[in-house]
Image: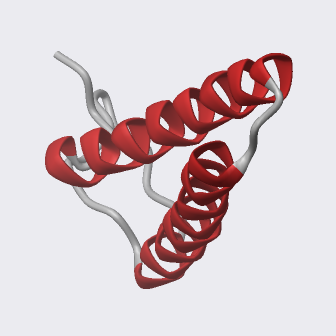
């Protein structure tokens, strides 16, 4: 059965939720590794790279949480 919606419903399927959960966990693990590496590295340039990388992972986690909070709809 196929339904057409005028407006996308404010829902997230179980499959979508599983995928978002996996994505969040991958990014969280990478974020923790980047932060841990940043704190244990002496090279200033490498610290800067790890800081930028951790920011990318944090931003992605924030976007995933935003999707979960809004159900995928941005009004």
Residue shown at the point (27%, 32%) measured from the top left:
73
How far from the left and from the top, in percent, is residue 70?
Answer: 18, 41
Residue shown at the point (40%, 73%) measured from the top left:
13
Of residues 20 and 56, the one drawn nearer to the viewer in this rendering: 56
Residue shown at the point (52%, 38%) measured from the top left:
60
Q: Classify 42 as above or below 65.
A: above
Q: Classify 1 as above or below 51.
A: below
How far from the left and from the top, in percent, is residue 41?
Answer: 74, 45
Determine the image quadrant of residue 50.
Answer: top right
Of residues 4 and 14, the one drawn nearer to the viewer in this rendering: 14
How far from the left and from the top, in percent, is residue 27?
Answer: 60, 58
Residue at the front extreme of this rendering? 42
Model colouring: secondary structure
Q: How many marks?
A: 0
Q: Classify 59 as above or below 37.
A: above
Of residues 63 and 73, the one drawn nearer to the viewer in this rendering: 63
Q: Quadrant of the C terminus?
A: top left
Q: Classify 21 as above or below 75.
A: below
Determine the image quadrant of residue 4.
Answer: top left
How far from the left and from the top, in percent, is residue 26?
Answer: 64, 68
């Amino acid at each position: 059965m196929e339904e057409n919606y005028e407006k996308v419903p404010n829902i997230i399927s179980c499959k979508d939720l599983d995928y978002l959960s996996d994505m969040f966990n991958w990014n969280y693990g990478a974020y923790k590794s980047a932060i841990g590496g940043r704190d244990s590295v002496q090279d200033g340039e490498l610290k800067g790279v790890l800081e930028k990388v951790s920011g990318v992972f944090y931003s992605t986690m924030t976007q995933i949480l935003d999707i979960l909070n809004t159900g995928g709809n941005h009004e």
